[in-house]
Image (tube, rainbow, N blue to C red):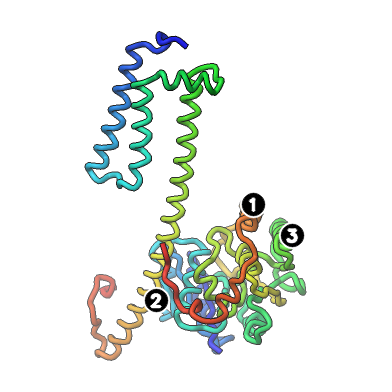
Amino acid sequence: MNWDSISLVLRIGLLAAGTGYLGLIFWLLKHKKLTVRYAIIWLASAAVLLVLALFPYIVLVLTDLLGMAQPANLMFILVIGFMLLLLLSLSSIVSGFAEKIKRMAQKQALLEQRVRQLEERLRAEGGGQPPFPRESDQN
Amino acid sequence: MKVLVIIPCYNEEANIRRVVEDLRRQAPWADYLVVNDCSTDASEAILRADGCNYISLPVNLGIGGGVQSGYLYAREHGYDVTVQMDGDGQHDPAFLADVVRPVADGRLDMAVGSRFLEKKGFQTSFMRRLGIHIISFLIRLLCGVQVLDTTSGFRACSKALTAYYADHYAQDYPEPEAIISAVLGGFRVGEVPVVMRERMGGVSSINPLKSVYYMVKVSISLVVFRLTVGRGEARLKYLNGPDVAPKEERT
C-alpha cells in the first residue's frame, strides 16, 4: 500500500475535524450540557479518530490484514458499528429513564391523594378553613 | 376481606360518574380507586366534585402504568383482592362478586372475567374477536394456559399477585402480557363467565385498522416476552413474608 494514497491536505483536514470534534465534546462538558458518565464513550471515539488521522498507516495495514478492497470500507464499518452500539445503549438508557419516570409519577400520584385526603380532614376539623391555602383552592 | 376495585380512567367524562355510581350501588362492600391517567377532559373535575376516591397521575403513563399505580395503592393499603374494571362502563359491577369469589376462596390468583365462556351480551366486532382468539391461541402456546378473553380488563387478583404486579407490570399491552407473566410466575389463572356491555358513551381508543396493528404488535411482544422470561417462583416469593410489603426500587 502506498503512502501517496492519502494526500497531505486530507490529513490536515481530518486532523482539524478530529480536533474540532474533541473541542466540541470538551465545550459541552465544560458547560454541563453533557455528563462525564455519557461523555467517556464520545471522548474515546474522538481519540480513535485523532490517532487514525495522525497515523493513517494503521488503517492501511488493517485494511490489508482484513482483506478489504478499500481503506474507506474499513472506516465505514468501524463508524457504523460504533454508531449502532451507541444507539442501542441510548435506547437502553432511555428505557431506564422511562421506568424511573413512571415510578416517580406513580408515587407522586399516591402521595398527592394522601395529602388531599389529609387536607380535607383538616379542613373539616378546622371549620372549613383550608389548612394550606393554594391557588387551586380558589376555584 | 378487603376488596379494591381499580378503575383506570382516561378522558371518560361521559362515563366515569355513572361507572362509579353503578359500582357503589351494586357493590357497596368493595372499596374503589379511580386512576385518572392525566385526562385532558373534565374527568378530574367530575371526580373531585363527586368526592370520589381517586388518584391523578401527573403525566400520562398509559393503561399499564396507570393500573400499576392502583396495584401499588392496593399493596400500600393491604387489600386482599384487587379488581380491575374499565372506566367506560363495559364491565357490569353486578358480576363483580363472580369475579372476586374464586380469588377470595383461594382457588385462583387471578380470575379473568370472560365474555366468551357463555357467549352472552356484547361480543365485540368480528375483527377484534379474531384478534382476541389469536392472542388466546398464542398464550396457550407460550405458557400452556387457556384463557379465552385475553384482552378483558375485568379481572380480580389475589394479595400476592397484587404485590407482584405492583413491582412488575407490563406497560405496552398489559392485559395479555399480565396473564403470561402471572402464569410464568407460578400464579393460578382462570376465567369466569361475565356479560359485557357496549361502552356507554365517548369513543373507544381502538378502531379496525388499529386493532390489526395492535394484534401484530401484541403477538410480537408476547413472543419476545416469553423468550426473555423463564418460569419462576414469584408466587412463593410474594405469597409469604416481607415481599408483600412495599419494596423500594433498587438502581
Please identify, in this view, whether the residue under mark 1 or under mark 2 is nearer the observer: 1
Dot 1: element: helix
Q: Residue B8, how many percent across, how many down?
A: 51, 70
Residue under mark 3: which chain is it in?
A: B
Q: Residue B228, how many percent across, how many down?
A: 60, 56
Q: CA distance from mark 1 to mark 2?
A: 40 Å
**Of all residues shown, which one is farthest toward the right?**
B118
Q: Residues within 10 Å of mark 1 (few under 14, many from 20)?
A: few
Q: Can you see residue B77?
A: yes
The residue carrying mark 2 is B48
Q: Residue B97, how many percent across, how many down?
A: 64, 84
- Where does the C terminus of chain A fall, quadrant-wise? bottom left
Residue under mark 1: which chain is it in?
A: B
Q: Residue B42, how many percent across, how many down?
A: 42, 67
Q: CA distance from mark 3 to mark 1?
A: 13 Å
The residue carrying mark 1 is B220
Q: Earlier in the sequence, mark 1 or mark 2?
A: 2
The residue carrying mark 3 is B141
Position above or below: A103 against A19: below
> Residue at the location (70% across, 74% down)?
B190
> Residue at the location (55% across, 81% down)?
B240
> Residue at the location (46% across, 41% down)?
A87
Q: Quadrant of residue A29?
A: top left
Question: Hey, what amino acid is under mark 2?
Answer: Arg
Q: In the image shown, does B183 or B171 lie closer to the viewer?
A: B183
